[in-house]
Image: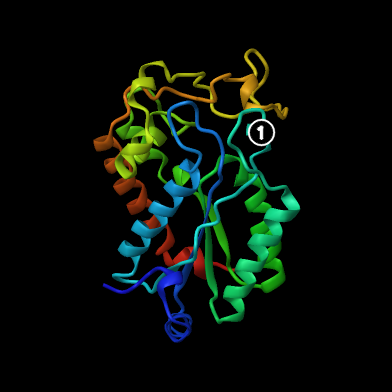
Amino acid sequence: MSEIDWSRLKASEIRALAARNAIVIVPIGATEQHGPHLPSMVDWRCVHEVSHRAARIMEKTTPTVVTPTIPFGMSEHHMSLSGTITLDYATMYAVIRCVVTSAVRHGFKRIFVLNGHGGNTTALQNMIGELTVEHKLPFATGTYWDIAAKSIARLLEKQKALLHACEAETSMIMAMAPELVNPDELSQMHGPYIPGLSAIPTVNEGVYRWRQLSSRSPIGVIGDASTASAGKGEKLLAAISADVAEALVNERLWSEPI
């Protein structure tokens, strides 16, 4: 099995991967509150795990390397609840731009920024667009629960999608770090189900208005964590990673004209 972790590779090994036209995965998440029952690392820890699992699947057929996970994102909408560290747009763009440009300077041409935090999604699409124009290379980005939406929906009992501190996220953390989950809180960990922080009851869903998460859910939970389990979390991680791997090794992702 080849090493897929950039931080564990020597410079000569990274040069060799670039020469083989390896795909670079740049995971980014967030450090923010996830209700009374989960740690603040949920977003970056989940995307880190998915990135590494996906890369291990990919490297069987396609050279792949995963950079260190970026643990911070755009989380201003969580700042009214404790435990959150947020970046502004300019700072996050500077970090993404420097990481991507560093990889390009080492000879990599296929770079995918894998997102694990909803507050980053639109910003990353804009950033990747600008970097594609700048470098004239087919960079791409995606959020793991969008890539694996169908698989996630099949595995959940009380939700149709991954939300926040919910059945899905709680299950995945229970699979990876059960000692950090407070099981006594789970039966009370439920909030609104409507995805999207801007959603307001009776207001057209096409209208956007920025809101703090605490105005939607005082406990910082969107969805229902009461049926979370470690077994479900392992199934989610396996299915999501397989879907991400399949998406990234699709040659058309990289070969279609810019």
> Furthest-right residue in view?
90
Residue 126: tell me if it is visible: yes
Disc 1 marks which amino acid? Met
Q: Quadrant of residue 61?
A: bottom left
Q: Quadrant of residue 52?
A: bottom left
Which residue is nearer to you in this view: 158 or 213?
213
Write the residue at 63% across / 33% down: 78
Q: Residues within 10 Å of mark 1 (few under 14, many from 20)?
A: some
Up/down of 40 relative to 130, above or below: above
Q: Quadrant of the N terminus?
A: bottom left
Residue bearing the label numbered 1 = 79
Judging from the image, the colouring scheme is rainbow
At mark 1, the secondary structure is loop
Q: Position of residue 229 (x, y in %)?
A: 28, 31
Front-lying residue, 34 or 222: 34
The residue at the point 45 percent across, 87 percent down is 12
Nearest the camera: 101 or 182?
182
The x, y position of residue 16, in whole percent, is: 43, 85
| Residue at the spot 46% in from the left edge and 31% down from the top edge | 165
Quadrant where the C terminus lies?
bottom right
Q: Tell me the quarter of the picture where residue 62 sits.
A: bottom left
Q: Position of residue 25 (x, y in %)?
A: 48, 63
Q: What is the count of numbered marks?
A: 1
Kindly give the residue lying farthest to the front in the view shown. Answer: 179
In the rendered image, the vertical position of residue 31 relative to residue 2, given as above or below: above
Q: Can see residue 258?
A: no
Which is nearer the eye, 103 or 133?
A: 103
Q: Percent from the top left, x then y, of residue 147?
A: 44, 47
Residue at the outermost top position = 202
